[in-house]
Amino acid sequence: MTQMEVVYRYGSMPGEAEMRAIDSVREVYGIRRISFNEKERTVRIEYDASRFKEPVVAALLRRAGIDLNEQLVLA
């Protein structure tokens, strides 16, 4: 397993429906953790890079209704 993290900035705040959809993303095998920082409007995802590439992770979030604006560079 190769653990990776990616952080995205999002536009509009996720509502109740989006948060329910995020719960189903958490169930996807290979997604380890999803955490939101409401103050910075970011979402951080830990995932297994041997199962997914970053664009797949972004697609899962977009399918859940998250308004992703940009991927942030982790230092």
Image (spheres, rainbow, N blue to C red):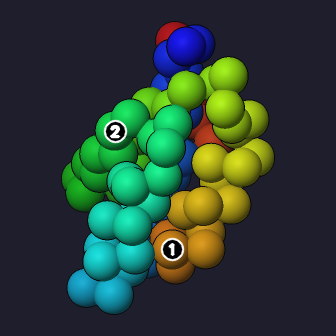
| Residue 57 picture location, percent across and down | 62, 48
- The answer to whether residue 74 of the structure is visible from this angle is no
Image quadrant in which you'd find residue 48: top right
Q: Is residue 11 left or right of residue 22?
A: right
Circle 1 SS class: loop
Binning the other alpha carbons within 10 Å of mark 1 as few (below 14), some (14 to 19) or many (20 upward) gives some
Binning the other alpha carbons within 10 Å of mark 2 as few (below 14), some (14 to 19) or many (20 upward) gives few
Q: Is residue 53 left or right of residue 63?
A: right
Query: Residue at 25% across / 85% down in the picture?
Result: 16
Q: Nearer the viewer, residue 53 or 35?
A: 53
| Residue 10 picture location, percent across and down | 49, 61
| Residue 40 picture location, percent across and down | 32, 48
Q: Nearer the viewer, residue 28 or 41?
A: 28
| Residue 41 picture location, percent across and down | 37, 56
Circle 2 SS class: strand
Disc 2: which residue: 33
Image quadrant in which you'd find residue 50: top right
Q: Is residue 33 left or right of residue 10?
A: left
Of mark 2 and mark 1, the one earlier in the sequence is 2
Query: Residue at 44% across / 31% down in the picture?
Result: 46
Q: Is residue 27 left or right of residue 71?
A: left
The amino acid sitting under disc 1 is Ala
Query: Residue at 64% across / 24% down in the picture?
Result: 49
The amino acid sitting under disc 2 is Arg
Quadrant containing the N terminus in the rendered view: top right
Disc 1: which residue: 64
| Separation (CA) of disc 2 from disc 1 | 15 Å
- The answer to whether residue 59 of the structure is visible from this angle is yes
Query: Residue at 74% across / 35% down in the picture?
Result: 53
